[in-house]
Amino acid sequence: MPRRFIALTSLAVGAALTVTVTLATPALAKGTTQASITGPGLARPVTISVAAGSEALPGQGDALSSLADQTGLFTVLFGPSIGDITMSDKPSRLRTPPAAATLGPRYTLTYTVPGITPAPGQASDQIRQYLYPRAAGGPVIYTLPGQRGFGQPLQATGWLRGTPQLTATLTRLGIPAGASLPSAPSSAASAPAAAPKPNDTTAPAWLIATIASAVAIVIAGTTLWLLRWKQRRTAGHAPV
């Protein structure tokens, strides 16, 4: 019986690990292949691409990866924790929406991300953000809710505050950046009319897989205990 218990428990754990790998691998193996920025003052879209057959991934350091890091694309797709990768230029979440009067001109940033599953009305293989490079206090990024990533809703939507690295990156791309407006007033900030408040973040795939693993192990252990108890009871009532 102990051997059978060990074997079935191992089977349950292996199945749970398979689920975890299946859920995590598509996201971790995918990145963006292109970014396009449109907005006021640009005669044509500013486009950044990678070489054919490659993808920009977290922490790579090339132009597209850096822009994606600095605008929070990988946080939006994969959640706040991306393995052991540390990004010093990662944007921070804003607790309240900024006032519309402090945002300045709005640019549309569209990433091409092969393999995502678009929601109704969402363009295939595209994640869209609004970019405010001249907002008071530093650049601001807004990720529209309702979009989907790799088989699930985006891990984070709403307002992010960019770092000075984003300002430098946008300036190199020919996009006017740097605060041109006074600091936000101390009174309560009102949300801009063009963008709703952010949705709550969704549970990451690894958390779902971990819960599934625990449930599978508990079910397997309980089933084996009941079988063993039934066998002992049957043996105790067997005729001599």
Image: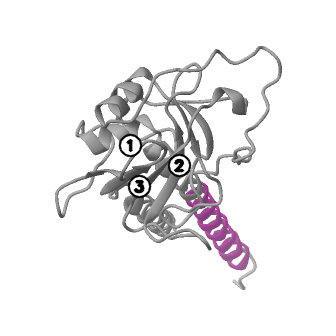
The answer to whether 18 is drawn above or below residue 83 in the figure is below
Given residues 96 and 240, the one toward you in this image is: 96
Q: Amino acid at mark 2?
A: Gln
Please report the bounds of the magenta region as a residue range: 211-235
Whichever of labels 2 and 1 marks the residue nearer the N terminus, that label is 1
**Residue 111 tag number:** 3
Secondary structure state at the residue bearing disc 2: strand
Residue shown at 66% from the left, 26% from the top: 102
175 left or right of 72 in image: left
**Residue 68 tag number:** 1
Residue 50 makes an appearance in the image: yes
Residue shown at 51% from the left, 65% from the top: 5
Given residues 35 and 103, the one toward you in this image is: 103
Quarter where residue 217 is shown: bottom right
**Residue 212 colored magenta?**
yes
Secondary structure state at the residue bearing disc 1: helix
